[in-house]
Every structure is written in C-alpha cells, then in structure tokens.
Image (spheres, grey):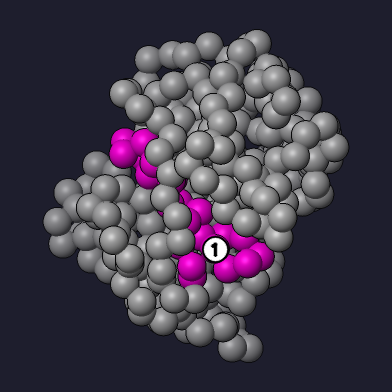
Amino acid sequence: MKTRTIVVSSASLAALALVALGVAPAATAAPAPAAPRGALQDAIPLPDGFQPEGIAIDARGTAYFGSLADGDIYAADVRSGAGDVIAEGPGTPSVGLDVDQRGRLFVAGGPAGDARVIDTRTGELLASYRLGSGATFVNDVIVTRDAAWFTDSQQAQLYRLPLGPAGALPPQDAVEALPLTGDFVLQPGFNANGIEVTPDGKALLVIQSATSTLFRVDPATGVATAVDLGGVPLTNGDGLLVEGRTLYVVQNRLNLVGVVELAADGRSGTYVDQLTSQTFDVPTTVASYANSLYLPNARFGTPPQGAEYSANRIDR
C-alpha cells in the first residue's frame, strides 16, 4: 500500500440486473450557472457556520452542499467558486446528497428521519418522505435509474424510494424498508453510513463506520456480505464514490481518501492507495468532476459559530 500526498493551494452506472435500484416551499433562488471553461477552483468557500456534510456535483459543474446546522442547500460553481443558498432548510440537518440527471437533488435528513427532493433549477421542494422513526439517522443516499437508496446509521436497514416511469417521484406509502442481515450486525455508534453501487451494477456497497467494514448488500434480500479487502480496515469510513472499478472511501478523522480497486461484483477488492491534502479538516463525503475529487471539510470538533468552511479539490 502506498501513500501519496497531494498539496493543493488554499485558494455515479448501469441498471441493476438483480433488482431495480435507483432512489413549506423552499426559497427560489436561481442555481449557480453552468461552469464556464477554465481552471477548476482548488477551494470552494462555503458560508461561515454552514457545517457542511454532503456533496453532489452535476454535469454542468455545479456543486451542491447540505448544512448540518439548518438544512440549507448551497450551490457553487466548481470553476469560479461563486455560489449561493438555493433552498432554505427546514431547520433540521441535510446530510448525504445525490443529484440525478433530471436536476433533482435527493437529501438525507439525518436525525429527522426524513428525505427531501429539491429542484436544483428553482430551489422548489418537490417532495418529502418519512423514512425512519425512533432512534434514526438517515445518513446518505445513492440514486440509480429506478430508485433512491438511503442508509440509516442507527438502524439495521436501508430505505428504498422507487422511481416510476420517467423518474416519477412516488407517494409516501411506496417507501420500502429493507432490513440488513447476513454479516451486518448493528453496533454501538454509527452503523450504515456511505452508500454506492458495485461496478457491475448488481448490488449495493455500504460502509459500517462502527466496524470499519465495507459490505456488499443484495438489494433483493438485504443480505450483507463483508467485502474481502485482505484484512485492511476502512477506519473512520464515511462517504463512498465508485468510478469504474475504483472505490474512493472518505476516512474522515484520518483526513484521508482510501482508494480500493474492486472486483466487478464488489465481493472483493484491494486497498491500493491513500490520497490526502494539507487542506483537509475532517472531510466527510466526496464527489467527482472531470479528473478531480471535491470534499467538504466538516471540521468536526471545531465550534461552528462563525467558523470558516470550504470544499477542497484533489486530483484523482
């Protein structure tokens, strides 16, 4: 295993073969414009006190961030760095994010146990869903052709939000809970966190933060099998990103991105590299644009009042 340090300046997939995967009106501020030609910003400044966690980047080069403080959604251009709040939050956190090809942002609601869908062009709240109840933390989301899948870090289950023809959003009663079984055992602390799809598009990948373990989950049954990484733990594993056969694992408090080369079916992989940057301050999630990775610094442990926040770019 090699370690590569990248110093930067201050300044997802095939349809699943086993089962169809997928997943008060808000402010109407215009989204950030499409990214013009030019160099990518090494750092995207976020509002003071914003407390970012999730990130998603669309094909235009607009990056979206959710606030743990109040759920606001901030959009910024990856080339100019300019941005603004496009949707005011409900006063509860916005955690993991994913954006689909229709310009809809799917938002995991953390301890509120909900999910929201926002039109990135208008900031309009298109739908909201109750997912978890009781002890719940709806943490992350991945959208595929036919559904949006959400993790719950306090319960041994995933949530499936099926998408209809042309991606139509479903009614509340269509939400499905999929219990996690097999090798996955609920532990004290944070459990299912980041989520992705295997390279062959036939299963889900879920990281259990409490055990530093990556699981392959059968979307039809919920049976989870630990991915064979040769005994290498994914310590502090958080957000996941799959690009081809490469899995990027954000290892938040280690200020690292682990790089894993996966088998196509996601049953095994090799931890081959680590990416880091002097600008990292507890990054939590990751999204790609062109040949770059962007990670928001959550800065856990830093008093948020008036604190400066940013997302930072590294090469991939």
Q: Position of residue 298 (x, y in %)?
A: 35, 50
Q: Nearer the viewer, residue 108 or 272?
A: 108
The quadrant of the image that shows the N terminus is top right
Residue 168, above or below 300: below
Name the residue rendered at 47%, 14% in the picture. 186
The percent coordinates of residue 81 (x first, y second) are 44, 78
Query: Residue 82's x, y, as percent?
Result: 41, 81
Q: Which residue is under mark 1?
A: 104
Label 1 SS: strand
Q: Position of residue 47 (x, y in %)?
A: 27, 68
Q: Is residue 58 above or below residue 258?
A: below
Report the magenta residues as a range: 99-120
Along the horizontal axis of the image, is 163 left or right of 309? Answer: right
Q: Is residue 223 magenta?
A: no
**In percent of the image, x 27 and y 55: which residue is there?**
90
Left or right side of 184 for 267? right
